[in-house]
Image (spheres, helix red, strand yellow):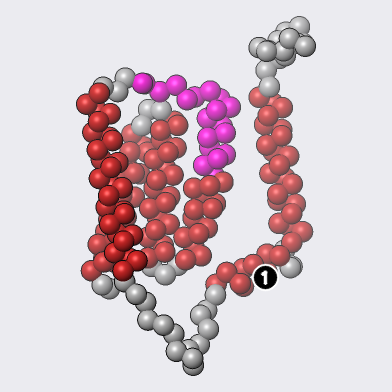
Amino acid sequence: MPLFYTFNFYLFGIIAIASALAFVTRKSPVAAALWLVNTMFSLAALYVMLDAHFIGVIQVLVYAGAIMVVFLFVVMLLNLGQGSATTTDIRAWRGRLAAGAVGVVLVAQLLTMLRVRLPEPGPDAAPPVNAITGVADSLFTENLVAFELTSVLLLAAIVGAVVLARRTAPDGADEPGADA
């Protein structure tokens, strides 16, 4: 494995571990959810580096996307988002400097990757094996009904959660803002 991939593998591994530790140590559930998203993206990068592209994409779509949206929806529904907002100026600047350093490192890696040229496949090269085609064919042919029923079930669950979370006053009028 070339040095570039080894470095990135360890870098994303360390980021994933640090993000997971930050996730379990946060008091604010919203901050914890954001650290969990960072962990999921780091794991997706590790999967892509291990040539498991489909699993990396599914990691981002399912876990960092859908599951985190549901988690944040529950946090907002239960109104758990009040964390301590007592950050000092020094801590804020440290966070900004760390974010800037990470951004510079990622831009440098991107520029390095753009300079590396992959060899062009010859005319007799075999077509690449595509893992997504088999899953997509199965999902959208023989399992299409189950796929659509699952989407309708999720929509009904979201609507039900909104209806259950709607607070009503004892006299039957909606809570704040219901002047009509």
119 over 2 or under it: above or below: below
Looking at this view, name the residue that lies furthest to the bottom.
124
Side of 39 relative to 95 (left or right): right
Q: Residue placed at 54% from the left, 51% from the top?
A: 62
Residue 102: image x %, image y %? 28, 47
Kind of residue indicated by mark 1: Asp
Task: Let me know if residue 9 appears in the view.
Answer: no
* Mark 1, secondary structure of its residue: helix
Q: Assign the C terminus to one quadrant of the image.
A: top right
143 over 106 or under it: above or below: below
**Magenta stretch, residue numbers:** 67-85
174 over 101 or under it: above or below: above
Side of 72 relative to 166 (left or right): left
**Which of the 4 image quarters holds residue 140?**
bottom right
Q: Which residue is labeled 1 in the image?
A: 137
Q: Residue placed at 72% from the left, 45% from the top?
A: 153
Task: Let me know if residue 10 appears in the view.
Answer: yes
Q: Assign the N terminus to one quadrant of the image.
A: bottom left
Q: Main secondary structure of the magenta part?
A: helix
Number of numbered discs overlaid on the protein picture = 1
Which residue is nearer to you in this view: 160 or 53?
A: 53
Q: Residue placed at 71% from the left, 56% from the top?
A: 147
158 over 119 or under it: above or below: above
Residue 126: image x %, image y %? 50, 87
Residue 32: image x %, image y %? 41, 35
Residue 68: image x %, image y %? 51, 42
